[in-house]
Image (cartoon, helix red, strand yellow):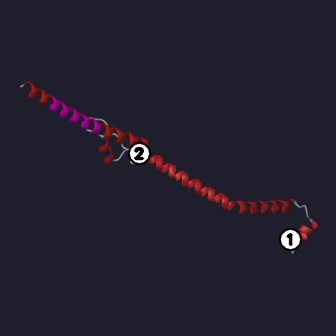
Amino acid sequence: MTNFLHKLFNPHCPHCAAEAEAERESERLSRIDPTIEILKMELEKSQRRERLLLDKVMSSPSPEMNQVLQDTDGKTPMIVPKSTLWRATQARLESESLKVADEIRQKKIEELEGSVLGEKKDASE
């Protein structure tokens, strides 16, 4: 009741104005607060993920990885990706089929040369 009388007789009191401003500010923050909290949680999660990745990258390789990286010649082995592009697969398959075709062609040439040379030997005798 005294608060009501105070506001009635002193409507522009600096103390009351400050309280009203603080109340408006807290109301505004309460409307924005859930969004801010969600954004803060997402930021913390992404920072944690970045720190974890950075730690893994900067840490020394595990003993298993050291064995994989060390080759008898001192060279590192070629790392083959698990998924390849269609163009790369197509080029590999084409090169393999060309090798097989060359082998077949060489066998036919040798057979023809053998049969031609065999006929010449028979004709010369």
State the mark number for residue 84. Answer: 2
Quadrant in which the N terminus appears: bottom right
Question: With 15 as the anchor, is 88 left or right in this view?
Answer: left
Q: Residues within 10 Å of mark 2 (few under 14, many from 20)?
A: few
Nearest the viewer among 96 and 60 is 96
Is residue 7 shown above or below 83? below
Question: With 24 as the anchor, is 93 left or right in this view?
Answer: left
Nearest the viewer among 38 and 119 is 119
* Residue segment shown in magenta: 100-116
Three-letter code for the amino acid on which mark 1 is drawn: Asn
Residue at image x 84%, y 61%? 15
Quadrant in which the C terminus appears: top left
Q: Is residue 111 magenta?
A: yes
Q: Residue furthest bottom?
A: 1
Task: Mark yes or no: residue 53 visible.
Answer: yes
Is residue 29 shown above or below 112? below
Three-letter code for the amino acid on which mark 2 is drawn: Thr
Q: Residue furthest left?
A: 125
The kind of secondary structure element at disc 2 is loop
Nearest the viewer among 124 and 69 is 124
State the mark number for residue 3. Answer: 1
Residue at image x 90%, y 61%? 12
State the mark number for residue 65. Answer: none
Q: Residue furthest right?
A: 9
From the top left corner, tell me how far across and down residue 123 is, in percent: 10, 26
From the top left corner, tell me how far across and down residue 31 is, in percent: 72, 62
Question: With 109 as the anchor, is 120 left or right in this view?
Answer: left
Which picture quadrant has residue 100?
top left
